[in-house]
Each structure stands twice: as C-alpha cells, then as structure tokens.
Image (tube, rainbow, N blue to C red):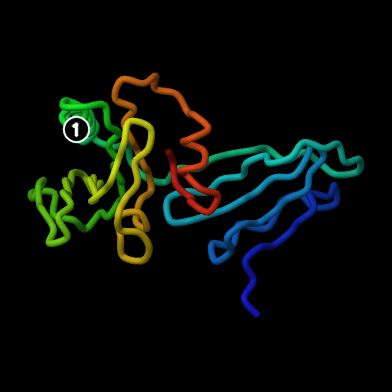
Amino acid sequence: MLRLTDHHFATRERDHLPPVDESLMLDYVVGAAGIYARGRRPGIEACIPIADARVRGLRGVQPYVQFGYPKVPARLLALVFAVSRAVARVEPRAALFHLSFNPVVDPLAPLSSSSHGRMVFSEAGWNLEFPKQQGTDKHVEALEKGAGTSEERAVIELHSHHEMDPVFSPTDDVDEGAMSFRLY
C-alpha cells in the first residue's frame, strides 16, 4: 500500500526525530507546543507549525526551512521586474514566473526559447521560466500544469502585483494551493 503521510511524537525518550522521508507528501510531528508538518524535496526541507496545542510529556519541536541551493542571480530577478513592468504597461495585469535549479544547464547560453512558446533564461544553474499564462489584475495562472511543466519543476514561484501592494493576500493563499511545495 502506498503511504502518503507518516506521524511521529516528539517524546522525551527520543533525542531526534527520524529524517524526513522524501517519498511522503507530509510527515506530521506532534510536539509539546503543537502539530508540525514536515516535508522534503530536492533542495528544500521544512518543518512548519500547523496547529497550536499544549501536550504535556512531549518535547519541543523547532520549525525550520533548509534551502540547499545558491542564491538566485540578481540578473534573473532584474529580468522578472522588467517583464512584469512590460506586461502591466498597457493595463494592470499580473505576470507569473517559475524558478527551477539544474546545475547542468549550459551557463554560456543565458537565453533560449522553447517550442512550447515559453521563455527560459538560465544563469548559474537557475532557470527562470515565463510560462504560457492567463492573467488579470487580481489573478494569474499557468496554462500548462502537471508533469513536465515549469510548474512541476519550480522551486520558487513568483508573480507580480503590478500597481497593488506587494503583500500576501487571501487570493494568493488560494492560488498557491495546499499541495505545492515551493517557495512563493
């Protein structure tokens, strides 16, 4: 039977929790201060509090995020800003970007265009993709989703807010979905 989750108690008798199993969607941990969700994918591991509770007899669990990739090059982020401004120049509209990491991409080929009509820019192992998308002033989404798409490869997902304040919103929370494991 395929297991999607696991559950652990942070008991005082146990010094360390077992390592996170990357094949699981989530690993739940119950500790002295509440319930935590742990997960791991290549380059990212996190332990995030999801519910507060006081449980006597258990030890504390420290939340964390471990990022195993180098910093995103400033040139790629500058490109995100330039494309976002260009997209919103005619009318307020959000733009979506996916960043993935692949150290074997040729660093001497910083610009390419795929047959799927999306643009891909690469530098220092980072790939910035501007996927085919549909957007409004309040929402943007990739038109291609699932296996083999930039959405699947994304370690970091960015979207612009054109004239709106650069803050997380309830719309962002819904758009990001519960099953995505990436940085937003």
Q: Residue at left 57%, top 53%?
A: 39
The residue type indicated by label 1 comes to Val
In the rendered view of the protein, which quadrant contains the C terminus?
A: top left
Question: Is residue 75 placed above or below 42 in the rendered structure?
Answer: above
Q: Residue at left 13%, top 58%?
A: 114
> Which element type, helix, strand or loop, lies under badge 1?
helix
Considering depth in this image, is 124 or 155 the residue closer to the camera? 155
Q: Position of residue 18 (x, y in %)?
A: 68, 58
Considering depth in this image, is 60 or 183 the residue closer to the camera? 183
Question: Is residue 119 placed above or below 88 in the rendered structure?
Answer: below
With 112 as the anchor, is 163 left or right in this view?
right
The quadrant where residue 20 appears? bottom right
Q: Residue furthest bottom?
A: 1
Q: Residue at left 35%, top 54%?
A: 151
The quadrant where residue 59 appears? top right
With 37 as the anchor, is 160 left or right in this view?
left
Q: Position of residue 159 (x, y in %)?
A: 33, 36
Count of labels in the image: 1
In the rendered view of the protein, which quadrant contains the N terminus?
A: bottom right
Residue identifier under label 1:
87
The quadrant where residue 31 appears? top right
With 56 as the anchor, is 73 left or right in this view?
left
With 66 as the anchor, is 27 left or right in this view?
right
Q: Position of residue 154 (x, y in %)?
A: 35, 51
Question: Is residue 18 placed above or below 60 in the rendered structure?
Answer: below
Question: Is residue 80 placed above or below 97 in the rendered structure?
Answer: above
Q: Position of residue 46 (x, y in %)?
A: 56, 45
Q: Residue at left 18%, top 56%?
A: 105
